[in-house]
């Protein structure tokens, strides 16, 4: 028997487990204040159901049950919630506002620094299209970071239809595929070579070269719109402009940069996409976007937008910024000389909000004080029939009787 965990998963020991729970609760409180209702989904579903969310799903962890049915662990929460909304909330009035805090699972060929089980917090706003809903989920992600004391973040804002519209101008399917891969992996050297040899019109090559490597200002976005000759691209630019107007109302434009070369690996995105970054991480802290076609795959067509926040990455950032929430040490050790009274006293103190541990080892007074000192207790109560003696274990002298 192996007394260790498989690669890509890990244990949370008491201090980190408590910190994780408290971080989740702080995020949950923010979601509730924005009126996003929490939902839970099964950790595994039929593979064919989850596969509706992404046509590749190469990273899905699959297994057969005892009946020979192919099941899979959920690789994200958006697809299960889309399934839930399309079937269980089919006729409910929009918008549907859902939130979640859950573990998700992905198969990884390269395990270095990449977990197979990880934790996400996020929201989905379903049934409403338009810039106001897009801006709301982005603003909510930022509000969650603000409440936890995370600062100095940047948000990249892009649009799937901007790149799709440009790619439509290329008649060569293989060339389109290679350019998409170069954008997805941010291999700009390869992209430049592909553009030089592509059958794209000159204006498309100019626009792609311009947006691939750098972010744009609003003025540059408006200038770019005058360059393009595709209605689909112009509509994407107009949509981004509308979202920026609402983000300005939320006070977020200083931390937003326009990244129109952004491409996401999941194929269900249909409109705005965004990613959040902080200097401490070499990867995204949160990401999301609009996915108007996903619910239709489950039989109820509705527009939708959402985001997912990577919880363990957030905890790394908080720790590096010295904002880690340290667990409260057990405050009171109750040592029963008369157990019935000691248990009642412990119950009373817990109801007052104190953290209390009752000795179950029948320690001597000396043993109890040494134990309390090692464990970080701030107070020890020796409870007898006659009285309750409160002792500071650091000085080992009585602090009073009650």
Image: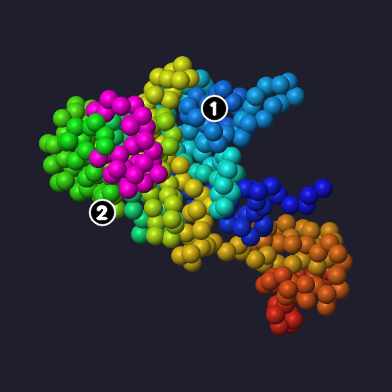
Q: Is residue 78 magenta?
A: no
Q: 254 or 125: which is nearer to us? A: 254
Residue 197 picture location, percent across and down = 26, 37
- Quadrant of the image for the C terminus? bottom right
Compared to 83, does 314 lie above or below?
A: below
In the rendered structure, the answer to whether residue 147 lies left or right of residue 107 reads: left
Residue 385 picture location, percent across and down = 85, 67
Residue under the point 20% across and 49% down = 217
Badge number at residue 50: 1
Q: Main secondary structure of the magenta part?
A: helix
What's drawn in magenta, residue-wise? 168-196
Name the residue tied to disc 2.
Answer: 254
- Label 2 environment density (alpha carbons within 10 Å; few <14, some 14–19, many ≥20): few
Compared to 148, does 399 lie above or below?
A: below
User: Element under label 2?
Assistant: helix
Q: Splitting the image into 4 quarters, where does residue 352 fall?
A: bottom right
Compared to 274, does 351 lie above or below?
A: below
Residue under the point 34% across and 26% down = 173
Q: 288 or 208: which is nearer to us? A: 208
Q: Nearer the viewer, mark 1 or mark 2?
A: 1
First in sequence: mark 1 vs mark 2: 1
Residue under the point 43% across and 60% down = 280
């Amino acid at each position: 028997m192996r007394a260790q965990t498989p690669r890509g998963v890990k244990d949370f020991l008491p201090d980190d487990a408590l910190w994780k729970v408290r971080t989740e609760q702080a995020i949950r409180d923010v979601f509730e204040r924005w009126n996003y209702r929490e939902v839970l989904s099964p950790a595994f579903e039929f593979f064919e159901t989850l596969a509706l969310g992404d046509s590749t799903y190469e990273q899905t962890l699959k297994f057969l049950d005892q009946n020979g049915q192919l099941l899979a662990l959920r690789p994200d929460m958006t697809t299960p919630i889309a399934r839930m909304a399309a079937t269980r909330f089919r006729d409910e009035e929009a918008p549907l506002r859902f939130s979640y805090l859950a573990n998700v699972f992905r198969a990884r060929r390269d395990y270095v620094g990449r977990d197979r089980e990880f934790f996400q917090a996020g929201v989905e706003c379903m049934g409403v299209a338009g810039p106001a809903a897009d801006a709301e989920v982005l603003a909510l992600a930022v509000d969650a970071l603000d409440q936890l004391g995370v600062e100095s973040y940047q948000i990249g804002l892009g649009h799937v239809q901007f790149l799709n519209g440009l790619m439509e101008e290329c008649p060569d399917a293989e060339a389109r595929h290679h350019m998409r891969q170069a954008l997805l992996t941010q291999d700009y050297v390869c992209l430049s070579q592909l553009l030089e040899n592509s059958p794209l019109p000159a204006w498309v090559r100019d626009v792609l070269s311009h947006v691939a490597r750098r972010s744009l200002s609003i003025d540059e976005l408006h200038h770019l719109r005058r360059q393009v000759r595709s209605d689909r691209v112009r509509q994407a630019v107009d949509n981004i402009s509308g979202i920026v107007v609402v983000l300005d109302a939320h006070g977020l434009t200083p931390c937003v940069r326009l990244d129109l070369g952004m491409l996401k690996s999941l194929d269900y995105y249909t409109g705005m996409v965004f990613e959040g970054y902080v200097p401490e991480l070499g990867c995204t802290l949160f990401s999301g976007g609009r996915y108007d076609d996903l619910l239709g795959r489950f039989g109820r067509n509705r527009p939708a937008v959402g985001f997912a926040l990577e919880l363990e990455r957030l905890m790394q950032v908080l720790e590096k910024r010295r904002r880690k929430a340290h667990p409260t040490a057990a405050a009171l050790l109750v040592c029963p000389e008369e157990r019935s009274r000691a248990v009642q006293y412990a119950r009373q103190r817990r109801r007052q909000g104190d953290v209390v541990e009752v000795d179950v080892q029948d320690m001597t007074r000396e043993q109890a004080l040494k134990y309390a000192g090692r464990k970080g207790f701030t107070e020890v109560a020796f409870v007898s029939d006659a009285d309750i003696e409160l002792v500071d274990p650091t000085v080992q002298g009585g602090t009073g009787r009650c």
